Structures are given as C-alpha cells and as structure tokens.
Image (tube, rainbow, N blue to C red):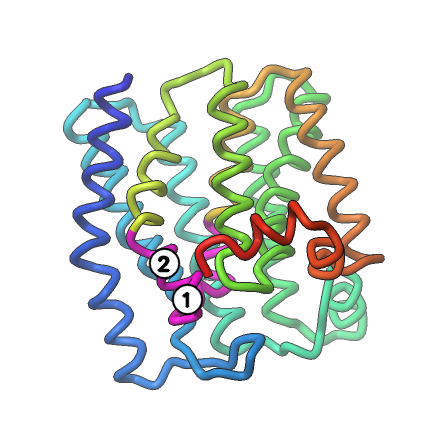
Amino acid sequence: MANIEIMSFVLSFVLSYIGVPMILNMLIENNVVSQNYKGDDIPYTMGLSFVFIHTISVYLIMLIYKFKMTNIALYLISFILMGLVGLLDDLIGDKNIKGFKGHIKSFIKGKLTTGGIKAGTGFLLSLLISLLISKNIIEIIINTLIIALFTNLINLFDLRPGRSIKVFILISIIMLITSNVKEFNFFFYSFYGILIIYLPLDLKGKAMMGDVGSNILGITLGIYCAFTQVFEAKIIFLIALIVLHVLAEKVSFTQIIEDNRLLKFIDNLGR
C-alpha cells in the first residue's frame, strides 16, 4: 500500500504544480475575486483545483493499480457533487444567512438558499452512502451523521488563511493512525500532494479555496472515517463532531484560538 500512497502523492503534486497556477490566473483574469477578512480582494473558489486534480489523481490510481470501483466510485460521485453545490454557494450564495438555523428558517418560509441546497445535498449523500455500506440501522445512523457533520466541519474553521486546511491535515493524520482499513489512505495522500502547492497561497492570503474547497475536504474526512474506522472510533469522532457543531452556534472559534497561546501559534504558522 505504501507504493500506492507515494504514487498518489506524486501524481497530485505534479498535477498541482502545473494546474494550481493556471487556475489561479484564470480566476484573476476573469475577476473571480472576493474580500477576505482583511478586506483585500483575492481569488476565491480555488477549491476548484482540488476537484479537478484529486479526481484525475484518483482515477489514475484506479487505472494503474486496477482498483475495484464500488466504494471509490461512491466517494468520487459524492466528492464532485459536494464540490458543485459548494461552488454554487460561493458564486450566488446569500452571505447574510448564516448557520443551519438560518437556512432552515428560510426554507420554512418558502425561500430556497444555496446553503440549504448544500446542507440538503450533504445529508442526502451521507444517508445514501451509509445505506450502501452499513450492516444495520445503528451503523446507518452513525455513518450518516459522521459524513454529514464532517462535510460541514471544515467550513466552520474557514475564517482565516490556512486554518481549515491545518484542521483537515490534523484530523486526517489522526484517522490514518486509527484506521482499521488501509486501502483508502491514498485519498489523503492525494490531498497532501495538492496542499503542498496550494497551502502557501492560502496562508499568505493570495487565494481562498471557498466552500467548494471546504466541502470536499470535509466530505473526504467523513467518507474515509465511515469506510475505515472501527465502531468505537466512530463514536468518539461523532461525539467530537457534535460538540464542535454545538459550540459553533454559541461561541467564536476565532476568539478561542486568539485567547490560547498554543492554538494561536499553530494558527499563525506560515502566515
């Protein structure tokens, strides 16, 4: 399996070295820019590069190593679809409506929001995947919640340069260590190859990955967790996810990070 992981990393690194600057220039030339937290206009939706590069890399790995399609196909379909709804939210989303509550209230009032589409699509994909891979009703519920909540998790931290990507890397490393199944490890190694090229741009405030990026990083964590973790580990991850989502409705993660020396140090690394 180590050969697959190395090949996946190298493929994504090479594709990113070529593709990330081209996509960045395309967005700049077409004025696809948005204000960051400092008020600077920078290219966003750079998560598009993740969609193209990761999808091509995974297909090449499947071709080279003759992987069976079933679970990887489930992942790729969900990955691409969540990227699509994330892109929709980036381009035409109403930034004044925040959180699950806001989108649910809008839906009840008869107003469809891109955030509502994103949440609904994420939950539906999570449920469908869980129905296909789970053995009983308990597993269906746990896998559905894990995939859905992970899909939204990265977006909760995407408020400062590089922060959400650092969260993704940390959680993915934990999952690699705790995983009971190793055949899907190359999902993460493919992203590591992309992030070596992309992350410096994000850290220096030269680009934002947008919801298209945070969605696909999140659903990758969720599906990998559902595919590879033992029941006990899933329960721990699920409890942590629920706590983080409840906290996100009540407190500012940015303020918590600013008030903690260690978290602030990690958050500022590379900027």
Viewport quadrant of the N terminus: top left
Q: Amino acid at mark 2?
A: Pro
- Give yes or no for residue 84 being in the magenta stretch: no
Q: Nearer the viewer, residue 59 or 247?
A: 247
Q: Nearer the viewer, residue 26 or 111?
A: 26
Q: Indicate the position of residue 271 as horizontal and vertical percent values.
A: 46, 61
Magenta residues (range): 197-216
Q: Residue at x 69, y 60 (%)?
A: 254
- Residue 260 higher or lower than 241, as above or below: below
Q: Indicate the position of residue 143 as horizontal and vertical percent values.
A: 63, 30
Q: Residue at x 38, y 71 (%)?
A: 206
Which residue position is annotated with label 2? 200
> Residue 204 shows which numbered tag?
1
In the rendered structure, are the residues bearing label 1 and label 2 in contact, judged by CB atoms less than 8 Å apart?
yes
Separation of disc 1 and disc 2 at Cα?
Answer: 6 Å
- Residue 255 higher or lower than 24, as above or below: above
Q: Amino acid at mark 1?
A: Lys
